[in-house]
Image (cartoon, rainbow, N blue to C red):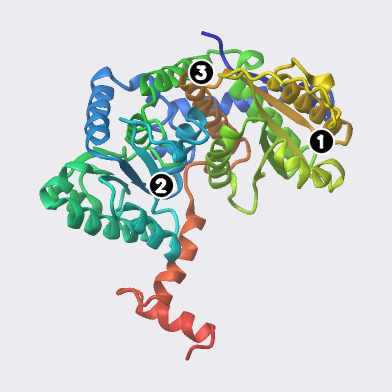
Amino acid sequence: MKQISVDITKAAQFLEAGTVEAYEPKVKAAQEALEQGTCPGNDFLGWLHLPSGITDQFLGEVEATAKTLREKCEVIVVAGIGGSYLGARAVIEALGNSFAWLLRDAGTPTIVFAGNNIGEDYLAELTDYLRDKRFGVINISKSGTTTETALTFRLLKKQCEAQRGKAEAKEVIVAITDAHKGAARAAADQEGYRTFVIPDNVGGRFSVLTPVGLLPIACAGFDIRQLVKGAADMEKASGTDVPFAENICAQYAAVRQALYTVAGKKIEIIANFEPKLHFIAEWWKQLYGESEGKDHKGIFPAACDFTTDLHSMGQWIQDGERSIFETVISVEKPKRQLDFPHDDENLDGLNFLAGKRVDEVNKMAELGTQLAHVDGGVPNIRIVLPALNAYYIGQMIYFFERACGISGLLEEVNPFNQPGVEAYKKNMFALLNKPGYEAESKAIRARIGCE
């Protein structure tokens, strides 16, 4: 099998010669710190050799549970937030039919995502949609008390039990949670739900290759074995024994940090010319934003879907403040072929495209965009997937994870914690008068003039 490739030449040209290569000793030190577990956040390094450690037995257990859910459910709701849903959704949408939500494919349940917001209309509309459906739930929460997910799961649990009966509901509700502690674990044990464990040493944003991602992906009907194989092959191809010049994870981490620290590029736009990759970008945004945004440092992760966003954000990218660089994900070979037709009247003037594949037009749009943006002062990194399948998506997932760990250590932050995420929760709990937050509630209400 081929490997995804990374071209940094049109980014490195914005730096003095040898700048990227000068990062080699720092990258080596970061790689060794990851391998030896001597870096900050070393209690969350379980993702590092996760792909190569996944067993056939474990995959069989995931596949068996997915088979049960697929047989018993028209709809499967994945309840989770952040890393507890983004990875699964990214893979499912990348591999699936763009109009899957409109199709009724016998034997393939519709996968719906919830628990990632507190929108009352969204949840009311979801419960309305599920009212006449045989649905099941995959509840993903290590603690079981994350507000968005816990609130949603309570609604879904009650509705599932009301519609299917408590005994049958127990067969179609699966908990992915902590091995021993937390509200979700207690509820699963009490109700007798099938459970999978979120490893203690794997943070949410790195968890797509755990049951958090693998079970929903298997429920959607995709090959999790190929996904894991791709990741395992990239794990091997990016290890400490791979020379810097051949290690695409090391190269990507080095060039993006050089653009940030040396060239002052503070924003990375990840872009694609394949609509199916939209949620890959959303997953990537969390991975890098939550890993690197510490101590008032960090490259801001943004995303665009091209060519769509060239008609909205294109002007800013081309001529706006030169604080950005681009990382473009390109798919070498689409799954389908569609040729552009001839039209005798040619009122749109497009007969010069007649007989060409639509993908050829898209590839020329990609190349033309790259040339224009580079000419406009935007460094460009290009990642190429030979095809959009589970194997190469697995490679890309691990590529971004490993590069993220290296890049965060080059930035001299802890890439594996997220202390800032708790700030809004504390304020929200105080405003809602959650038990245990009495002092905070009094203080915040005085601050906003409620007392």
- The image shows residue 140 at horizontal and vertical percentages of 32, 46
Depth order, front residue of 347/225: 347
Indicate the secondary structure of the residue bearing disc 1. Answer: loop
Identify the amino acid type marked 2.
Phe
Helix, strand or loop status at disc 3: loop
Q: Is residue 322 left or right of residue 138?
A: right
> Which residue is situated farthest in the top direction here?
1
Q: Earlier in the sequence, mark 1 or mark 3?
A: 3
User: How much space separates mark 2 and mark 3, taking CA atoms?
Assistant: 34 Å
Q: Is residue 121 visible in the rendered structure shown here?
A: yes
Which numbered marker is on residue 138? Answer: none
Residue at horizontal 80%, vertical 20%?
353
Q: Earlier in the sequence, mark 2 or mark 3?
A: 2
Real-space Cα separation, disc 1 to disc 2, in angstroms = 35 Å
Kind of element beneath mark 2: strand
Q: Which mark is residue 239?
A: 3
Tell whether 121 sits left or right of 188: right
Q: CA gap, disc 1 to disc 3?
A: 30 Å
Tell me if residue 104 comes above or below residue 419 in the rendering: above
Q: Indicate which disc residue 113 carries.
A: 2
- Kindly identify the amino acid type of the residue bearing the numbered disc 3: Gly
> Residue under circle 1?
378
Q: Earlier in the sequence, mark 1 or mark 2?
A: 2
